[in-house]
Amino acid sequence: MCYDAFSDEELIAKLRRGENEVTDYILEKYKPLVRKRTNAMYLMGGETEDLIQEGMIGLFKAIRDYQEEREASFYHFAELCINRQLYSALQASNRKKHQPLNTYISFSSGESDDGVKVEDALLGQSQSPEQLVIEKEVWEDFKQRLNGRLSKMENQVLAFYLDGNNYIQIAQLMNKSPKSIDNALQRIRQKVKQMKQEERG
């Protein structure tokens, strides 16, 4: 059966009525979102394939736990579940001192359908307004300093990468060799790592 004409919420309702093949359809439909979030996490030190698996686990949890009467939209709920799973996996493998900073680096490019920033939705559950203001200032400062350290090409590569493209797709978009894009991503990752070390003193 083709499910393209149905909304996510309608698909979840079908799944609850026993149409189990809906799960595979939603998992495939949301793979690009998982890839987009994984790309951002990769820059923070994660391993791509492991993070993709974690992201798919988060998506599966969203399918399992979504309740239309309690959640705004499935897309928004899935986005939050994917982000939480990825961030938890990265924290577990690489404990960090500056959690707010890491959260903003990982999720700064994400925005849900209803215009709510992912970092606001995540941190807003456990942080006070005063803490959120401080963390936003930390992120803005870090972003400005990172942009200042990246070349024009690296900034372009980073923008495409955080939008969910892999290095081969970026190479096509920028009319450059895949090797040059891969090298640029490695340089960006190294600069992020260096700045994190500087933050720790």
Image (spheres, rainbow, N blue to C red):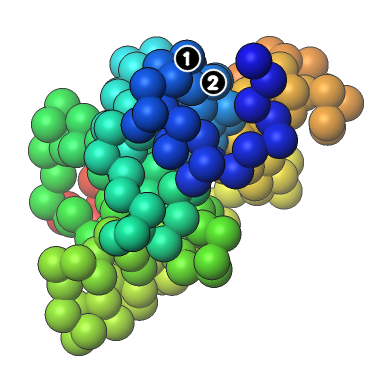
Query: What's the residue at 68%, 20% (across, down)?
Result: 2
Whole-percent x, y for residue 121 in the image: 33, 64
- Which residue is identified by label 1? 21
Query: What's the residue at 46%, 31% (across, down)?
Result: 14
* Image quadrant occupied by the N terminus: top right
Disc 1 residue type (three-letter): Glu
- Which residue is identified by label 2? 25
Foreground pick, 99 / 112: 112
Is residue 188 visible to the viewer in this orientation of the structure? no
Query: What's the residue at 35%, 77% (across, down)?
Result: 137
Foreground pick, 89 / 11: 11
Task: Report if the CB atoms under discs 2 and 1 are less than 8 Å apart.
Answer: yes
Q: Which mark is residue 29?
A: none
Q: Please, which residue is most extreme toward the right here?
A: 175
173 relative position to 148: left or right: right
Whole-percent x, y for residue 59 in the image: 37, 31
Whole-percent x, y for residue 161 in the image: 61, 36
181 relative position to 15: left or right: right
67 relative position to 142: left or right: left
Is residue 99 visible to the viewer in this orientation of the structure? yes
74 relative position to 167: left or right: left
Foreground pick, 24 / 3: 3
* Image quadrant occupied by the C terminus: bottom left
Whole-percent x, y for residue 145 in the image: 47, 62
Task: Assign a secondary structure to mark 2.
Answer: helix
Disc 2 residue type (three-letter): Tyr
Residue 168 figure quarter: top right
